[in-house]
Image: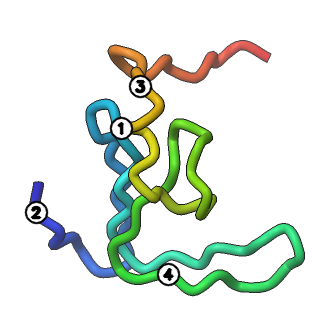
Amino acid sequence: MSTEIEPGKVRIEMLPEGPYEVVGEIEMIGLDGQVIKTKKKCYLCRCGASTHKPFCDGTHSKVGFEAAAQAVPESTEN
C-alpha cells in the first residue's frame, strides 16, 4: 500500500502475521507522559514479544505469531 495519505489523516494497517503499520503524523505519549518520537511511518508490535515495545523489532517471525484472520468489529452495545 502507498505511504501517501491526506494531510491530517492517519492510516493504521494490520500486516499479515506482523505489526501494525502506522502512516501519518501521530503523537504517541508514553506511560510517563513524555512524547515518544515517531516518524511519518512506524510499526507497532502486535505480537507482544518485541523488546522495543511499543515498536516492532521483528520478533513476531521468531515466536510464530499468528494474527487473527480478521479484525473483530467493536460492539455497539453498552
| Gap in angstroms between the C-alphas marked 4 and 1 | 23 Å
Label 4 crowd (10 A; few <14 / some 14-19 / many >=20): some
| Label whose residue precedes the other's in the sequence (2 or 4) | 2
Residue 22 position (above or below residue 26): above
| Label whose residue precedes the other's in the sequence (1 or 2) | 2
Q: What residue is rendered at 57% in x and 86% in y?
A: 37
User: Is 8 on the left-hand or right-hand side of 63?
Assistant: left
In terms of secondary structure, where does tag 2 sit? loop
Residue 2's label in the rendered image is 2
Residue 64's label in the rendered image is 3
Residue highlighted by disc 4: 38
**Residue at the front extreme, as displayed:** 62
Q: What residue is rendered at 33% in x and 14% in y?
A: 69
| Label whose residue precedes the other's in the sequence (4 or 1) | 4
| Label whose residue precedes the other's in the sequence (3 or 2) | 2
In terms of secondary structure, where does tag 3 sit? loop
The kind of residue tagged 3 is Gly
The kind of residue tagged 4 is Thr
| Gap in angstroms between the C-alphas marked 2 and 4 | 19 Å
Are dots 3 and 2 in contact, CB under 8 Å? Answer: no
User: Is 73 on the left-hand or right-hand side of 36?
Assistant: left
The scheme the figure's colours follow is: rainbow
Residue highlighted by disc 1: 61
Q: What residue is rendered at 58% in x and 23% in y?
A: 74
Query: Which dot, 1 or 2, sits closer to the camera?
Result: 1
| Gap in angstroms between the C-alphas marked 3 and 1 | 6 Å
